[in-house]
Amino acid sequence: MNFNDKPDRSWSKAYKWQRYKGTDILPMWIADTEFRCAEPILKALHQRVEEGIFGYTLPDHDTDAIEAVVAWCQRQYNWKIDPSWLVWTPGVVPAFNVAIKAYCQAGDTIIVQTPSYPPILAAPAINKLNRICVETVAVDGRWTLDFDALEDAAADPKTSLFIMCNPMNPLGTVLNQHELDRIATICRKHNVMLCSDEIHCDLILDNVPHLPAGAHPALAEYSVTLMAASKTFNVAGLGTSFAIIPNEKLRLAFNHAARGILPWVTATGLAATNAAFRYCDEWHQQELAYLKDNRDYLVSEINKIEGLKAFSPAATFLMWVDASGLRVNDTQAWCEAKGVGPSAGRDFGDKDFFRLNFGCAREYLVEAIKRLQGRKN
C-alpha cells in the first residue's frame, strides 16, 4: 500500500471534496481518509458484487462477520465478548440516538463532553432532552475530562446517561485506566448509564492500550460500547457499525427502541467488516505508522505558526488546533481564506479552535502548512 497516493475522488461525489468543489480550498475536514482500502476488503466486495444479488441479509445470520468481531476484540483489546452481545447498527450516530430513546425518559438530562463530535452535542436536543456539558482540561500537554464537573453533572437526579467519546474526537486523547476507573465510579455512584463512542479505537498512534468501556468490571452491566471498522479501514460509506451490550435487559431495550427506525446494516458493509478484521493486519500497521509520521510532522509545523498551537493526539487522524492566538473573530474563515478547509471548532463547542484531518498523503499536509503560513502558490 502506498499511502502517498492522492486518488481523484471527484467522480465518486465524495462529501469531503464536494464541500469545496470549484474552489482552491484544500478539504481537511470530515473524518474519512484519502487512503484506498486494503486489497482484502476490495476482494471481498468484488466477490459480493459478482454474486449479482443484493437481497435481504439478516446480520445475525452472517456468522463470519460476527466471529470476526469477536476475534478482533479478543486480539486487539484482550476483551472476550459473547456473540449474543453484538447489535449491528448502520452507524454510531443512529446508535447513540437509539441509546437515548432506550434509556432516557422525558425531562432527563444527558451529559456530553466538550469539545466533542457535533452529532453527540446535537443528540439530546434531537430527542427533546436536556444537555449538560462537561469541559475537557489541559493537563501536562494532554486533554482530559474535568472530573469534578463530571461528578457534579452526574449528581443531578435528572441525569440518566453520559455519552462519551474514547478516543476523544476532536482531541485525540485515549483514556487511561485511572480515568476510566473514575468515570466508572462516578457513573455507578449516581446511577448514570454510559454510552461510549469508540469508533476511533483502532487508530491509536502512541504506545497506550485502548480500554473498552464494556470491558470494565464496573461498567459491563451498565454500558453500551459503539465500534466499527469504518474509520480505521475507510469504509464509512458502507454504513456498518456495531454496539456491544453485555447486559441482556439493556440489549433488549436497545433493540426495542430501534424497531421501525434502524434498517439492517448493508450486505457489503458486513463483507467489508469481516475482511477488515480478518485479513488486513499488515495494512493496518502500515497505516498507523504513516499516520504517526503525519501527526509528528503536522504538530511540529503547526506549532511554528504564530497564533496556532496543538498537542500531539495519541489517537485518530485528527488534530485539534488552538487558534485563539490569532485573535480573529472567525477561525474557520481565516483558514479558508488561506486555502485550507478544516472542521470548524464552533461545531465542536469552541470557536477558537479548528480540527485538521491528517489522514492523507504527506504532500497534502505540506501544501496545507504552506498555505497556513501564507505561502500559497
Image: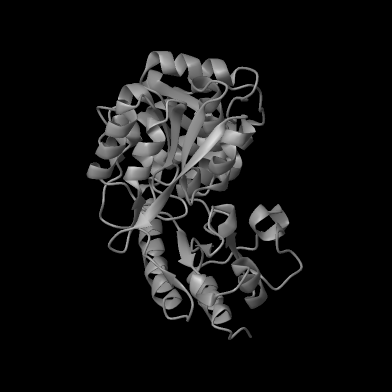
Closest to the observer, 206 or 338: 338
Residue under the image location 60 percent in, 31 percent down? 266
Residue under the image location 53 percent in, 31 percent down? 95
The quarter holding residue 236 reads top right
Quarter of the image where the C terminus is located: bottom right
Quarter of the image where the N terminus is located: bottom left
Give coordinates of residue 207: x percent, y percent. Answer: 25, 55
Closest to the observer, 129 or 72: 129
Residue under the image location 42 percent in, 40 percent down? 164
Residue 46 appears in the figure:
no
In the rendered image of this protein, does residue 177 appear above or below residue 287? above
Residue 316 appears in the figure:
yes
The number of numbered badges drawn on the structure is: 0
In the rendered image of this protein, does residue 285 appear above or below residue 47? below
Residue under the image location 40 percent in, 66 percent down? 295
Is 301 positioned to the left or the right of 129 in the image? left
> Coloured how?
one colour
Quick one: which residue is furthest to the right in this view? 22
Give coordinates of residue 33: x percent, y percent. Answer: 53, 56
Give coordinates of residue 18: x percent, y percent. Answer: 71, 58
The quarter holding residue 279 reads top left
Give coordinates of residue 17: x percent, y percent. Answer: 67, 60
